[in-house]
Amino acid sequence: MTKTTSLNIIFAGTPDFAAVSLQALLDSPHHVKAVYTQPDRPAGRGRKLTASPVKELALQHHLSIHQPQTLRDEHEQKKLADIHADVMVVVAYGLILPLPILNAPRLGCINVHGSLLPRWRGAAPIQRAILAGDKVTGVTIMQLNEGLDTGPMLHKLECAIQADDTSASLYERLAELGAQGLLTTLTQLAQGIAKPEIQNNALATHAAKITKEEAQLNWQCSAEELSRCVRGFNPWPIAHTKVDDQTLRVWQAQVIENNNSLEPGKILQVSAEGIDVATGKGILRLQKLQLPGGRVVNASDLLNAQHCLFTINKKLG
């Protein structure tokens, strides 16, 4: 990229997924004029106010940081417009951008989204792709409009979903892919060769926000579906079930039989390899587990410490 293609950028993002794109911009010829990120939030056991990963990175590079509660305020809109950016890059920011913000930069606002739009518009595209059993996902760089992930697509990159992918592992790969796609898109915008593609709304699916409640394992589901739940809800909120009156969190599991039709939720076998549980269709082997107040451990270690808790024919749920 030559100097003549560099752009003045406002960056808006909050989690580490966004920080990967910000780092890519900082390593490029583009100029990050300002960083917008969510206000500091209480975190950890002490509920101490904590800066977002994007803010931490911005502080390291002595960038201008803005943390408004909303961008609907006219004063905040004027402050942003006065930066005179060429483009605003938005990656998992977490605030709605009203029309005056969308129109403020010369080239508008573009977004790095963790799916192949129009599939999985919304808050949790990475988790929803795993939960649905998708084989392929990716990132889409799009022009933002007033809809929910409905803007014209500028660039797409595909990524295979591996059989052992969790949301955490897929998140990391898509963050890197998103940064790569972002730089390509900015080059095209700077050179005036970007070709926006309108989304086909008929193919759209909604990636609803993940809730803790849906992470409870329903043993009436198939082993394959439950395996996807374990992977899709890792690292949050973590798939869980009940053993006696205790919550058992399941961090890793494996389908070992797809066709067996036994009583769902019943423990069939315990061994060093794991705890085999009957499902609505097939058998799921629980491999990495966590009891309240305990560490995440292999099933063999948990069985050594709590062998009386996991007996043949006991029902989970």
Image (spheres, helix red, strand yellow):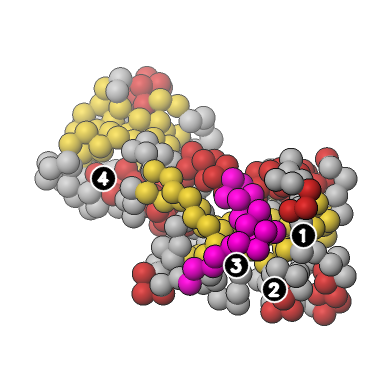
**Foreground pick, 16 / 4:** 4
Q: Which residue is mark 4?
A: 224
Left or right of 254 in this view: 44: right
Mark 4 and mark 3 in contact (Cβ < 8 Å)?
Answer: no
**Which one is in front in this view, the residue at disc 4 or the one at disc 1?**
1
**Which one is in front in this view, the residue at disc 3 or the one at disc 4?**
3
Mark 1 and mark 4 in contact (Cβ < 8 Å)?
Answer: no
Left or right of 314 in this view: 51: right
**Callout 2: 10 Å neighbours few (<14), some, many (20+)?**
many
Label 1, label 3: how far apart the Cα atoms are? 15 Å
Q: Secondary structure at mark 2?
A: helix
Q: Amino acid at mark 2?
A: Leu
Mark 3 and mark 1 in contact (Cβ < 8 Å)?
Answer: no
The quarter holding residue 107 reads bottom right
Left or right of 198 in this view: 46: right
Mark 2 and mark 4 in contact (Cβ < 8 Å)?
Answer: no
Quick check: can you spot residue 161?
yes
The quarter holding residue 243 reads top left
Q: Is 85 contained in the magenta span? A: no
Q: Which residue is mark 1?
A: 10
Q: Which residue is mark 3?
A: 143
Q: Earlier in the sequence, mark 4 or mark 1?
A: 1
Q: Amino acid at mark 3?
A: Gln
Residue 288 higher or lower than 234, as above or below: above
Q: Residue at x 24, y 44 (%)?
A: 223
Q: Residue at x 87, y 70 (%)?
A: 82
Label 3, label 4: how far apart the Cα atoms are? 36 Å
Q: Residue at x 17, y 47 (%)?
A: 281
What residue span does the magenta drawing correspond to?
179-198
Q: Amino acid at mark 4?
A: Glu
Q: Which residue is mark 2?
A: 102
